[in-house]
Image (spheres, grey):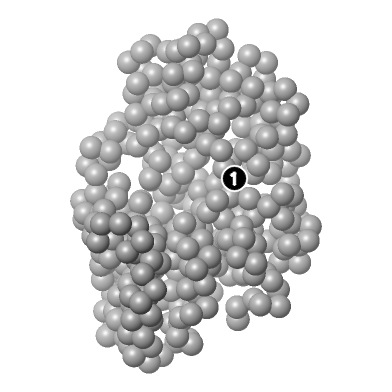
Amino acid sequence: MKYLDEYRDPALARRLLEELRRTATTPWRIMEVCGGQTHTLVRQGIDELLPAGIRMIHGPGCPVCVTPLETLDRAMAIAATPGVIFTSFGDMLRVPGTDTDLLALRARGADVRVVYTPMDAVRLAAVHPRREVVFLAVGFETTAPAAAMAVLHADRLGLDNFSMLVSHVLVPPAMTALLDDPHCEVQAFLAAGHVCAVMGWREYEPIAARYRVPVVVTGFEPLDLLEGILMTVRQLESGRHEVENQYVRAVRRSGNTEAQDAVREVFEVTDRAWRGIGALPGSGFELAARYARFDAAHRFAVDGLRPVEDAACIAGAVLTGARLPTDCAAYGSRCTPRHPLGAPMVSAEGTCAAFHAAGRTKEGSLS
């Protein structure tokens, strides 16, 4: 296959669905880890077309959604500091903190700018030597190499006015935390193809063996997901629990070793709080000691943060797959993409945003 349309061929989709119906003999519960996969499943209605008994559980694979509220409140305090140019990916601007969001701060005069890569923030620091330039570094392993390269470049340039507020998180600890929960219903995973393009899939092999769950590295197009689900069901039906790779056009077992080297140079693994979920040991990155001078959390003294989640928001339960967005009393009423109570309704990878964009209502909620 060469072109995107080939990964959306309806005839091939029907054939994969028919094969799924022939293969599945018992109910199975499969979690797609990535929010991008969730959006494809919901937007295309794939989750509703699957054979009866195969249920997709939407996982915590939205890095914007799991960025802790305290980090967001800290980001807004830094962004409001005179002389600061605060930079971020665009999908972070409307994520609600305790009292406001970055977009509202910009409307009130804060210099908040959208960048497309962390390197854009480094360039801004070079162009504005009298201003402090801060980049909000969020994301899974996918975006960590770009953040690492930005730090290395700022170091080479000798910039002393560039820093990062780091909130990178890691997928495998989240998977094991879910599987350790006695109420977990997940029997298999679709692993995020873009994360595995960077990290490979070797770190999933101990998880598959220890918990006896299949893990299938999967892409993001409709046919990718249908084939990944079929590969997963075949494993479940045969009693296997291996790591397989559906996303062969982009992922190798070893991943991108150059990117991994950059990440290891700049970051160290640390415990990280996940919004709505709580603290997970060894589930994130922080700047290594040799690059600590680029840590915005240390550079800017921000005291007195008292993060408070909206009591009506059930983001944590949605992120862990325990509840659907349509289970939330605020869904579609108090909480909409224009006025979100929580990050899953505003993020481009959020489950609530996916349901809302697809017109899912409480009456049409999946069982």
Q: In the rendered image of this protein, does residue 4 appear above or below residue 16?
A: above
Q: Is residue 144 left or right of residue 317?
A: left
Q: Considering the numbered disc 1 on the image, is that residue within a helix, a strand or a loop?
A: loop
Quadrant location of the N terminus in the rendered image: bottom left
Q: Where 341 sits versus 296, above or below?
A: below
Give the residue drawn at x 32%, y 85%: 19
Whether 331 is drawn above or below 366: the answer is above
Picture coordinates of residue 247 (x, y %)?
Answer: 28, 60
Give the crowd class for mark 1: few <14, some 14-19, many >=20 residues within 10 Å: many
Q: Which residue is mark 1?
A: 68
Q: Nearer the viewer, residue 249 or 6?
A: 6
Q: Residue at x 53, y 24 (%)?
A: 134
Q: Is residue 23 visible?
A: yes
Q: Picture coordinates of residue 328 (x, y %)?
A: 71, 66
> Extreme right residue here?
334
Q: Residue at left 74%, top 56%?
A: 335
| Residue 185 visible in the picture | no
Quadrant assignment for the C terminus:
bottom right
Relative to residue 8, is residue 120 depicted above or below?
A: above
- Point out residue 62 in the picture as x, y percentages from the top left corner: 51, 53
Question: Quadrant location of residue 155?
Answer: top left
Q: How many marks?
A: 1
Direction from residue 93 to residue 150 in the image, left or right: left
